[in-house]
Amino acid sequence: MKILVISDSHGNKGVIRKAVDLEVPGIVLHLGDHDSDCEEIDPEYPEIPFRCIRGNCDRSSAGSDTDEFTLGGKRFYMTHGHLHRVKLGLSSVFKAASSRGADVLLFGHTHVPYYSVKENVTVVNPGSIGMGGKTYAVLEFKNGAVICNIKSV
C-alpha cells in the first residue's frame, strides 16, 4: 500500500490534489495546519481514505491533536508536533511515540522534510506541502520495513 503523508497545507488545496493525482495512494495522512483542507478534498476522492489531525493553526477545529492506528502490521503515531516542541528537537515527540509502541512516527510543524530510523522507529516529517518546497512523503511497506521517499510537487 502506498501512503501519502502531507502536512502544513495552509490552504493550498490545489497542490494536495496534484500530489494525490500523481501518487494515487491507498490512504492520505494529513498532519495538521489547515486540516480543513483535508476535509474539503476528501469527498473528491471517495476511494481513498483520509486521516487528518489538527495543528497549531487549527485552533477552531474539532479534530484531534493526535491519531494512532495500525496499517500493514505497523503501529502509527501522528501528531503535528507543536505540542512536543519539535522545532527545538525530537526527544519529546520520539518519547511520546515510543511510549505508545509506535513503529512509525509522523509529525509536521517545522516545514522541513525529515526521515530517519531510530531504535526501529521510522520517523518522518513530510515538510510543508502548501509552502516553500511543497514537499510530501510517500511511505510503502517492503520486506517488513517502512520505506520513505520525500518528494515535491
Image (tube, grey):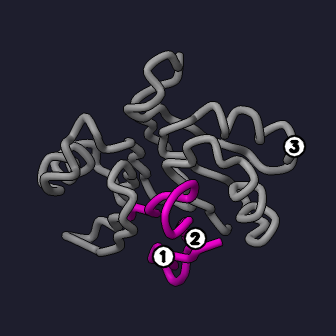
- SS for tag 2? strand
- SS for tag 1? strand
**Extreme residue in the front direction:** 132
Q: Which of label 2 and label 3 is nearer to you?
A: 3
Give the residue displayed 70% in from the left and 33% down from the top.
Answer: 39
The residue to which callout 3 is attached is 44
Rendered location of residue 83, percent (x, y): 25, 34
Give the residue displayed 52% in from the left and 57% down from the top.
Answer: 131
* Mark found first going from the N terminus, 2 or 3: 3
Q: On the picture, is 90 further left or further right than 47?
A: left
Is residue 124 or residue 104 the one in the foreground? Answer: 124
Q: On the picture, is 118 further left or further right than 67?
A: left
Q: Give the CA separation, mark 1 to mark 2.
A: 6 Å
- Magenta-tinted stretch: 124-153
Above or below — where is 110 with respect to 62? below
Q: Quadrant of residue 103?
A: bottom left
The residue to which callout 1 is attached is 148
* Mark found first going from the N terminus, 1 or 2: 2
Q: Give the CA separation, mark 1 to mark 3.
A: 26 Å
Rendered location of residue 149, percent (x, y): 51, 79
Kind of residue sitting beneath label 2: Val
Q: Quadrant of residue 110?
A: bottom left
Kind of residue sitting beneath label 3: Glu
Rendered location of residue 21, percent (x, y): 81, 65
Principal SS element in the magenta part?
Answer: strand
